[in-house]
Amino acid sequence: MAKISLEKGVFLVSEPFLPDPNFKRTVVLLTEHDAEGSIGFVLNRRTNLLLNDVLEDFPEFPVPLFLGGPVEQNTLHYVHDARFNIPGSKEVIPGVNWGGDFEVVRELIENQMLQPDDIRFFIGYSGWSAEQLGEELDDKAWILAPANSQWVMHAPEDDDLWRYVLRQMGKEYSLMANYPEDPRLN
């Protein structure tokens, strides 16, 4: 597998025994990475909430909310299919944009142009200070993997995505996908 650089548009795959419960067996889409820090969203932590549970006066739109990470869990974020021209959005990877004008999102939903499979909503986000993520990579807390739009927009909602991404990375990582959560049970 070719070496993957730490940059926006990659997956951060937690190592199998990462002790932090916020990131245990998670896959994070890195949406921003620069000299000031990094931002991403956990793709495989579905909450029991739907979008309409947290937004008043919003069109009926039966989509689940995902826990994007432990930072500012009182904020709402979204990634969406790049086919939709949402002003202010940023390309993360080909086919997937992040954010943009929420009023345009509302209009697209009201006009039934934006469907549940076209957008994923997150409460909170994952964030790292300027050097923090690089240090965590040096400590082997994360594995970098190539991201693709199919996995972002249609990811399984539990650790199946974590296992799937590892298996796609080749033999060495495929073995990790089968590690038990508690190594004493091996």
Image: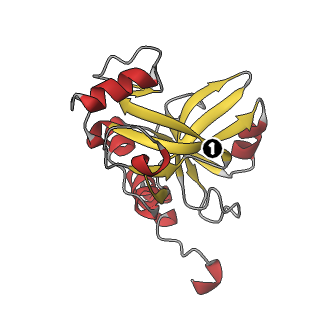
**Position in image of residue 72 (x %, y %):** 67, 42
Question: The disc labelled 1 sits on which kind of residue?
Answer: Asn
The residue tagged 1 is 74
- Figure disc tally: 1
In the depicted structure, whether residue 30 falls above or below residue 138: above
**Position in image of residue 13 (x %, y %):** 55, 50
| Position of residue 136 in the picture relative to residue 166 (left or right) | right
**Quadrant of the image occupied by residue 121:** top left
| Quadrant showing the N terminus | top left
**Position in image of residue 96 (x %, y %):** 38, 29
One can see residue 101 in this view: yes
One can see residue 95 in this view: no
Work out whether residue 160 or residue 177 is closer to the camera in this orientation and state it. 160
- Residue farthest toward the front in the current orientation of the protein: 57
**Position in image of residue 85 (x %, y %):** 33, 16
Q: Residue at horizontal 39%, vertical 57%?
A: 164
| Position of residue 152 in the picture relative to residue 117 (left or right) | right
Work out whether residue 27 or residue 179 is closer to the camera in this orientation and state it. 27
